[in-house]
Image (cartoon, helix red, strand yellow):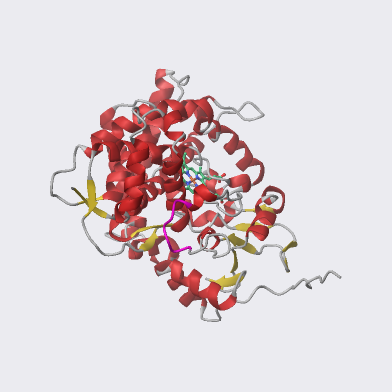
Amino acid sequence: MTITTPIKEELPPGPTTHALQQLIKWTAEPLNLLEESFQKYGDPFTLRFRKNNPFVYISNPESIQEILSRDCAKFDSGRNNHILLPIVGEHSILLADGKQHARQRKLIFPPFHGEKIRHYGEIITKITQKTAKQWEDGKPFSMRPAMQQITLEVIMQAVFGISDSHRSQQLKTRLTKSLELTGGSILQSSLLFFPVFQKDFPGSPWRNFLQRQKAIHQRLQAEIEQRRHQGKVEGNDILSLLMSAEDEDGNPMSDGELRDQLITLLFAGHETTATALAWAFYWIHKLPNVRDKLLAELATVTDVSDFKSLNRLRYLHAVCMETLRIYPVAILTFPRIAKSTVTIGNYEYPPETVLAPCIYLLHQREDIYPNPKQFRPERFLEREFSPYEFMPFGGGSRRCVGDVFAPMEMKIVIATVLKQYRLALAEKKEVKPVRRGVTVAPAGGVKMVLD
Ligand code: HEM
């Protein structure tokens, strides 16, 4: 006899504290809020950050698969990302839904996949070597900003091709400063989460942010105009591809659209990978056993810029995957908004319910990852995980565009550094994950020193 569980029409349980209290905790201590709620209410649970605006957090592979395998037809997502509008602009793929989203993805996805990305190996190695040369004997440095220097330069090359170094330097400085304003600390992250802080008056942090954004827009506009002027839109870089693309009616992207896609790729394409790399270096140097195994494996490769050879290294792959499992940079996929009534697991959700597949809690499940708080790359050698058990890059129709590019970049940077430098953690204390804008990153950025 099969027992069928009745479908519930109310939302899953969750904290009954005031919405503002929940929002403050979500901003300041997101992982604690997730773990406490999971322990108290199980999976799924509901958090409320505003009156009448519930978010349902889901962390079991079956329900996540139910959502992501039909997310295009049943859910919207872009319109829930409005929090990112001040950074990426109204035309960004992150904010688009439906046809518009599909069209933008069609343009952006191919340049980051297949043979095209292979030639980045040498570029990544060179940029890594240039950055690592700045590290001085005995002088501690912070790994996250060092990695951000590398990943920003790499994504700039992918997006613009080889561009004028003065102009690209200006853009890099402005982007880094702008991102610091919304992601440098919990207080700065609050700028994004609490619209009440978005006040534009002389000297206010928000005005500062707006001015930086304006400067970035002007730089990007100049880049676009210069390309048009040169008539040089046939290159392999993303800007050339976007400029030569047309929609079904033969219309090219407007300058506003171009600018917003560029800033989106620059934003999404480097912060995340820099954070993942900082975590990887933390774990590799915290656990000597991991480092020794990695060095032994790397000794079998002579050319670290050859991605094909690196891709064969199973332990390096396992270290990167375990890094993305234990503290995923994105703790949620983009939340999905039900377009009509949907049944997921034992719940029937009315239209407009926001469902948030929770990558962090999924990756912490004891039944999938025994002893989940332990960093143990071997788990990725012992078994394969389904795309709904391990999903640092989300899934479905919005799966990360950089899902191949980012791991490639991580492997090349790690291999280049480990083969040439002996590093050590500069501080013994455990590094904790903290909010950084919409992501989670190592507190203090991981201090390291040449050994
Ligand atoms: C370790 C590095 C990275 C991580 C952990 C990461 C993670 C994610 C996640 C979780 C999503 C949301 C997927 C979903 O909702 O299902 C996403 C979306 C996205 N990522 Fe990444 N990402 C990384 C690197 C990159 C890179 C290098 C690029 C640029 C090439 C990139 C571009 C994007 C874009 C454009 C989207 C939006 C896709 C859409 O809306 O259709 N990401 N990423």
- The range drawn in magenta is 372-378
223 vs 116, left or right, is left
Q: Quick check: is 233 in the magenta stretch? A: no
Q: Position of residue 403 (x, y in %)?
A: 51, 42
- Res. 329 image quadrant: bottom left
Quarter of the image for the N terminus: give it.
Answer: bottom right
* Residue sitting farthest toward the right: 1
Q: Quick check: is 374 in the magenta stretch? A: yes
Q: Position of residue 391 (x, y in %)?
A: 55, 51
- In this rendering, the answer to whether 35 lies above or below 305 is below
**Residue at (66%, 41%) from the top-left corner?**
99
Q: Main secondary structure of the magenta part?
A: loop
Viewer-side residue, 420 vs 94: 420
Q: Position of residue 343 (x, y in %)?
A: 74, 63
Viewer-side residue, 152 vs 425: 425
**Residue at (56%, 32%) from the top-left corner?**
107
Confirm whether residue 152 shows in the render: no
192 vs 142, left or right, is right
Viewer-side residue, 242 vs 249: 242
Q: Position of residue 355 (x, y in %)?
A: 62, 62
Confirm whether residue 391 shows in the render: yes
